[in-house]
Every structure is written in C-alpha cells, then in structure tokens.
C-alpha cells in the first residue's frame, strides 16, 4: 500500500530524505492516513509530520516524487472543492491561501491570497492587497493565470478582476485553531491539537479506523468531521491518551507548526 503514496516534493534535511504530501485545504481521508502510516513505518522513522502548509511529511527512505502542483491552504472546513481545483490547474511550485474572512490563513505569506469579503474574493499578492476582487467562479482561472507569470503580473488576469477599495487583514485574535467539541447541524466536529505536529503511525491508523473526513490545519491541529455524538465521545476517550489534545487551554498547543 505504501507504493500508492506519491510525494509532491522530496528534499534533504540534515542528511535525511524528506517526502512531502500536500492535501488541498488540508482535507485527508481515512485511506490516506492508512497509506501514510504504512510509509512512515516501512520507510521513515514511524512518524508523520504535519506542517503549517496543510502538508504531511515522512522522513527517511526513498520516495517517489510527482509533478509539481500548487500548495493550497484554506480556512478549515471551507473551500475544499475550490482548493482541489486550483491544485489541479496550477502545475508548478506555487502557494495559494484561501481565507474565509477572519484573516487567520493569510497571516502566512502566500504567492497569491484570496480573502472572502461579502460575495467575492479580494486578491492579495505576496502579502499585499492589490485593490482587485475576483468572483468565486473566476478564482481558478485567476490563480492559473498568475502562476504562469514569473513576477505575479496582473496583466493577464486584470480582465477577470473588479477594482475595489483595499481592505486590511483582521488582527490576530488568539490561537485560531478550532479545538474541542464543535457541534453543527446535529453532528460534532472534533478539533484536536497535535503537539509538535507529530502523528505517530499507530495514531494515524486509529484516525483511519474512524472512517471520517479530517482536516489538517496550519496550527498543529486536526479536525475530525461530522461524527455522531456517541462516536465523538468514544473518539476522545481513545485518542486523547494517544496524544491528541482536545482542551483549548492546554499549554501543549503552543508549540509552533513546522
């Protein structure tokens, strides 16, 4: 099963090979956790490392590298389909941030940022507002057009954009990672901190057994989506002793992401 994992990039850190897998919008399925656990145990050091760019890394071994594609980071629980479309359309090493409006995602620096304001996305290049907005159905084409320019020129995409008054990013308000019991529409999302961004292969297999969609956030945390209340209670009982943090006040949440 480990051969099914193709890494977005392969690098060397302190003499150790590092394979990086990107998940657009941080969305990781059960089978993907199982495959990552296989690779971490068979080729790596037994650990999956979660990064601030919604990526997973395995360290050690020999990895197969894929063709480049965009790294697309999004507000947790938002823009999953859009992120996948952008990653499929932009075939180069290029970073895109999709922010639902609170500014938490775009506090990182991306080549291209899209900040949702009302019904359109304000366009931000290299951390600087451009004074243009993009309709939701034009975002993929704008990202693709910008990625083709060596210096992020607006020349090829200006016709797809509308002039707007630039907006300042909202100021940070504490740790933006959703942690704990998050109820919505009769089901529960569980937000869990990942101390040091380290997911042991055994823990990854237990996450896979839940058979739920999960989201890696840029803040060393994980969201397990759409659980019935009884299942969510059991998940906390099993995964908390294995190292996941479900307490938003835990000091263990303060470790920076990779």
Image: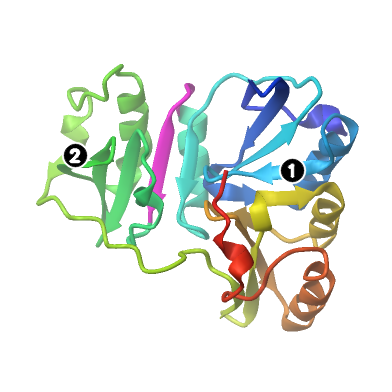
Q: In the rendering, which numbered label is found on residue 151?
A: none
Instruction: Say what secondary structure mark 1 lies in.
Output: strand
- Label 1 or label 2, whichever lies nearer to me, is 1
**Label 2: how many residues lie within 10 Å, few (<14), some (14-19) or many (20+)?**
some
Residue at image x 55%, y 54%? 217
Indicate yes or no whether the magenta region holds residue 218.
no
Residue 196 in sight here? yes
**Label 1: how many residues lie within 10 Å, few (<14), some (14-19) or many (20+)?**
many
Front position in the image: 78 or 160 = 78
Residue 49, percent from left and from top: 69, 43
Q: Quadrant of the N terminus?
A: top right
Q: In the rendering, which numbered label is found on residue 161?
A: 2
Q: Quadrant of the C terminus?
A: top right
Residue 119 in sight here? no
Mark with earlier residue (1, 2): 1
* Quadrant position of residue 14: top right
* Quadrant position of residue 119: bottom left
Residue 94, percent from left and from top: 43, 28
Against 76, residue 84 (above or below) is above
Residue at image x 63%, y 21%? 11
Give the distance between the C-alpha atoms of the residues marked 1 and 2, in whole angstroms.
40 Å
Residue 255, percent from left and from top: 58, 56
Please give the range of residues in magenta: 90-99
Instruction: Say what secondary structure mark 2 lies in.
Output: strand
Which residue bears the numbered disc 1? 48
Residue at image x 30%, y 52%? 115
Residue 104, percent from left and from top: 39, 57
């Amino acid at each position: 099963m480990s051969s099914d994992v193709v890494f977005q990039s392969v690098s060397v850190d302190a003499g150790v090979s590092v394979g990086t897998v990107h998940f657009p919008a941080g969305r990781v399925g059960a089978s993907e956790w199982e495959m990552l656990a296989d690779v971490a145990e068979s080729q790596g050091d037994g650990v999956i490392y979660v990064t601030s760019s919604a990526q997973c890394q395995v360290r050690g071994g020999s990895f197969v590298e894929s063709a480049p594609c965009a790294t697309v980071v999004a507000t947790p629980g938002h823009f999953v389909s859009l992120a996948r479309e952008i990653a499929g359309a932009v075939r180069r090493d290029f970073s895109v941030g999709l922010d639902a409006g609170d500014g938490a995602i775009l506090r990182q620096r991306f080549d291209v940022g899209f900040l949702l304001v009302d019904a359109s996305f304000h366009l931000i290049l290299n951390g600087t507002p451009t004074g243009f907005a993009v309709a939701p159905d034009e975002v993929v084409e704008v990202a693709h057009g910008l990625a083709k320019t060596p210096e992020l020129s607006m020349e090829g995409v200006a016709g797809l954009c509308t002039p707007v008054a630039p907006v300042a990013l909202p100021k940070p308000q504490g740790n933006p990672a959703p942690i704990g019991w998050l109820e919505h529409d009769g089901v529960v999302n569980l937000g869990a901190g990942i101390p040091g961004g380290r997911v042991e292969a055994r823990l990854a297999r237990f996450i896979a057994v839940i058979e739920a969609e999960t989201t890696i956030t840029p803040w060393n945390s994980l969201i397990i989506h759409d659980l019935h209340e009884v299942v969510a209670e059991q998940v906390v009982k099993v995964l908390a002793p294995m190292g996941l943090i479900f307490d938003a006040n835990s000091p263990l949440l303060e470790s920076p992401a990779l």
